[in-house]
């Protein structure tokens, strides 16, 4: 059982590491649909013919929208099509050895816990911002990760319990059983920094037979309520998030509304306030596509009116020019020079094109720099001074 638990932890860590890597390093998709939707949308589409990790086919967009329809309200959403990431992106960018190790990790998880991580169809990170407290203190947003696919949610709960080392405790709510865990190191830090109180406890719950959610306990309870028909997410938000059948990763959200909500412009937890200005300024759509050996970036940001669009475009262009002149690395400078920003109507447009080889070269250069820095830190570690042996003089 101990070896099985270690294997489960290793394989699950691989998957989570993959999600974090893609989420922080890649953004975009095939640009299509209206740029004036209420939520921003960042999508990535990659075409690949390399060998796959699994032959499972992704679900149709409308099927995914239907499966996410019971989620609670959210101010921002990030969607990951894990099937396409595993089958098309990783074979292009991950070394063959690492790819094989991940396959083996998945197999170990399947044998030890009866769950195959490669059968996860999608993962969605939902973020819900909170109004300030009655005594006017900022509150950290609530987070929740929802995963769905051809798997047993109960088996994934078993996997979570193994990975927690028995630290999960049960709580009944709305006919469901939540597994809750207190994170002791954060509890200690929260004594010094009250902002961290929101992250001292995490939970996990099976929303249905093949959907599992983890995150802030309060948000998980809201997800259970939403399943019962209370406070569900809008169809408009989901359609904005899953608008492209070829999407690999997408983002939808309204930053201005989130800011207004968090900083009291819509009132506090105890006092409502009618908003004085409703604007879609800042709502954005960014797409990264790949055709042959070239990447193309296309971006659109709502600026509310033509005058503001020109002001913002001039500001962004000036900042870009300054950044280009300040960067010493020629490869990075070349990339920045290829970015064009302009105003069209009440929108700010961004365009850029660069080769796949350029990206690969930058990734290799980054890895080499990291290795060199690590080597320097290792070789310059100060050694403890040798103790001198005391000797007595003979008289």
Image (cartoon, rainbow, N blue to C red):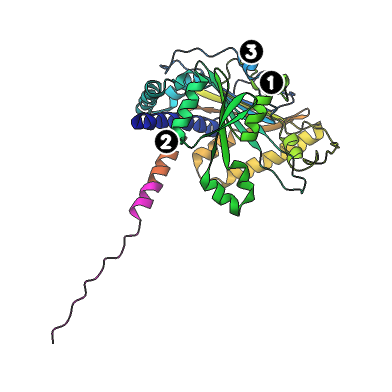
Q: Position of residue 254 (x, y in %)?
A: 72, 31
The C terminus lies in quadrant: bottom left
Q: Is 70 left, or right, of 394 in this rendering?
A: right
Q: Tell me the crowding category of disc 1: few under 14, some 14 to 19, or many 20 or more residues within 10 angstroms, Cα based.
A: few
The residue that mark 2 highlights is 364
Task: Determine whether 187 is above or below 251 in the image.
Answer: below
In this orientation, which residue lies closer to the viewer: 214 or 281?
Answer: 214
Main SS of the magenta part reads loop
The residue that mark 1 highlights is 228
Q: Residue at x 55, y 51 (%)?
A: 188
For marks 3 and 2 on the same chain, the one whose residue lies earlier in the sequence: 3
Q: CA distance from mark 3 to mark 2?
A: 39 Å
Q: Is 66 left, or right, of 261 in this rendering?
A: left
Single out the residue that lies furthest toward the bottom.
395
In this orientation, which residue lies closer to the viewer: 218 or 90?
Answer: 218
Q: Secondary structure at mark 1?
A: loop
Depth check, mark 1 against mark 2: the one in front is: 1
Q: Tell me the crowding category of disc 2: few under 14, some 14 to 19, or many 20 or more residues within 10 angstroms, Cα based.
A: few
The residue that mark 3 highlights is 62
Task: Determine whether 86 is above or below 379 in the image.
Answer: above
């Amino acid at each position: 059982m101990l070896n099985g638990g270690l294997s489960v932890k290793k394989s699950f860590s691989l998957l989570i590491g993959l999600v974090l890597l893609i989420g922080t390093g890649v953004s975009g998709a095939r640009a299509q649909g209206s740029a004036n939707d209420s939520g921003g949308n960042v999508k990535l589409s990659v075409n690949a013919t390399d060998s796959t990790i699994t032959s499972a086919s992704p679900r149709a967009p409308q099927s995914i929208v239907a499966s996410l329809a019971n989620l609670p309200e959210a101010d921002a959403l990030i969607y990951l099509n894990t099937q396409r990431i595993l089958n098309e992106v990783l074979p292009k960018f991950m070394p063959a050895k690492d790819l094989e190790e991940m396959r083996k990790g998945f197999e170990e998880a399947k044998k030890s816990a009866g769950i195959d991580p490669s059968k996860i169809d999608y993962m969605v990170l939902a973020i819900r911002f909170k109004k300030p407290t009655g005594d006017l203190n900022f509150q950290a947003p609530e987070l929740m990760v929802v995963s769905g696919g051809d798997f047993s949610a109960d088996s994934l709960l078993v996997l979570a319990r193994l990975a927690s080392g028995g630290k999960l405790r049960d709580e009944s709510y709305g006919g469901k059983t939540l597994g809750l865990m207190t994170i002791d190191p954060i509890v200690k830090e929260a004594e010094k920094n009250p902002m961290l109180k929101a992250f001292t406890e995490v939970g996990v719950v099976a929303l249905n037979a093949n959907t599992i959610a983890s995150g802030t306990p309060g948000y998980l309870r809201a997800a259970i309520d939403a399943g019962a028909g209370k406070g569900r997410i809008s169809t408009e938000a989901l359609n904005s998030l899953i608008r492209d059948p070829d999407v690999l990763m997408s983002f939808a959200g309204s930053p201005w509304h989130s800011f207004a909500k968090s900083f009291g412009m819509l009132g506090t937890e105890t006092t409502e306030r009618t908003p004085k200005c409703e604007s879609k300024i800042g709502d954005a759509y960014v797409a990264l596509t790949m055709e042959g050996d070239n990447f193309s970036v296309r971006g659109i940001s709502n600026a509310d009116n033509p005058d503001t669009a020109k002001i913002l475009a001039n500001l962004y262009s000036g900042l870009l020019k300054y950044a280009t002149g300040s960067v010493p690395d020629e490869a990075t400078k070349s990339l920045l020079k290829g970015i064009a920003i302009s105003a069209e109507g009440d929108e700010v447009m961004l365009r850029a094109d660069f080769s796949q080889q350029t990206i690969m070269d930058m990734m290799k250069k980054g890895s080499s720099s990291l290795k060199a820095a690590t080597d320097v830190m290792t070789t310059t570690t100060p050694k403890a001074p040798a103790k001198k042996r005391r000797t007595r003089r003979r008289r």
